[in-house]
Amino acid sequence: MSIEVKNITKLYGNQKAVNAINFKINKGEIVGFLGPNGAGKSTTMKIITGYVSASEGEVNVCGLAINKQTIEAQKQIGYLPEHNPLYLDMYVKEYLLFNASIYKVPKSEVDVIIEKVKLTPEAHKKISQLSKGYRQRVGIAAALLHNPEVLILDEPTTGLDPNQLVEIRSLIKEVGKDKTVLFSTHIMQEVEAVCDRVILISKGEIVADKNLKELKENQAQVIEVEFDLKIEKQFVKRIEHIVEVDNFHDTSWTLTFNTTTDMRSKVFDFAHENGLKILQLNTKNKNLESLFRELTT
Ligand code: ADP
Ligand code: MG
């Protein structure tokens, strides 16, 4: 087990930023930590990395208690904090060499990491001269230098332009091949693009912890259909697996089904059996984003 969060609560004054949360992350997983601003993502990550102590509860990283075996546990953690604090006046390579000396990592590692995060063309520039995307690479490089098992990335893609976004996502995927990664974001698509699993946090509480596959399978299936004639709602309700029927316009219906089986042919059968013609038919899967909104509002 790479990360174990057991019943963590964090109080700032009398405000509960995080309320009795629990999760476990296995070695090698890439997990998205998703939640709106102020949900408690950064607080949780600061507790996992040992930068802030929990008011209650326990965290183990690679089997080491973060509040007791702090240094040993931190050796297993690479952390990219929110807003990626860097020394802007330092050169990329200089900054990474400085980090290597702090971590007592051989200098030769710096070139390996620069190559790995594809910073080679920028390695001789000042950090202040880099675009946001390349600054994130420097932050990720610094987090990777001591070859930790666990990577904690706090909103690594926030503020990036679309091209940089794609590149940083694929970098996270790439480094995630041999690491355990927990990365936070407030954007659902981010999770879909990178992760196998999502932990959803809202108002300091975990509201969902699911495999993405499972989450997609559990989505409702919505079919919008227009018949040529007006019909009674009771009729429509006879179609199997139907859970919700909405007559949004004269002869147009929104049908919600609780099955993953494609229900379009059943709707055609229904029309045929009742002497109706279908003028239009669309399927609209409820996307993950609406699920996210449902769970967090
Ligand atoms: P997120 O990273 O999901 O946006 P945070 O963990 O930063 O959320 O914040 C969770 C809650 O705790 C917010 O209401 C925030 O205002 C509050 N908070 C965070 N840090 C502090 C702090 N140092 N002092 C007081 N309140 C804080
Ligand atoms: Mg945050």
Image: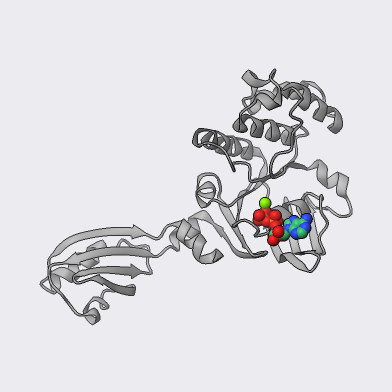
| Residue at the spot 24% in from the left edge and 67% down from the top edge | 266
Q: In the rendered view, does 293 fall on the left or right side of 252?
A: right
Quadrant location of residue 93? Answer: top right
| Residue at the spot 62% in from the left edge and 56% down from the top edge | 37
Percent position of residue 29, x then y? 63, 48
Using the image as rendered, state which of residue 68 and residue 131 is in the foreground: 131
- Say above or below: 110 vs 216: above
User: Which quadrant of the render holds ligand 1?
Assistant: bottom right
Q: State the quadrant of the C terminus.
A: bottom right
Percent position of residue 67, x then y? 86, 55
Q: In the rendered view, does 50 fall on the left or right side of 22?
A: right
The residue lying furthest to the bottom in this view is 234
Q: In the rendered view, does 270 fall on the left or right side of 66?
A: left
| Residue at the spot 55% in from the left edge and 50% down from the top edge | 196
Quadrant location of residue 78? Answer: top right
The residue lying furthest to the right in this view is 68
- Say above or below: 154 vs 108: below
| Residue at the spot 75% in from the left edge and 67% down from the top edge | 15
Percent position of residue 222, x then y? 33, 64
Percent position of residue 140, x then y? 68, 35
Q: Is residue 25 visible?
A: no
- Say above or below: 288 vs 163: below
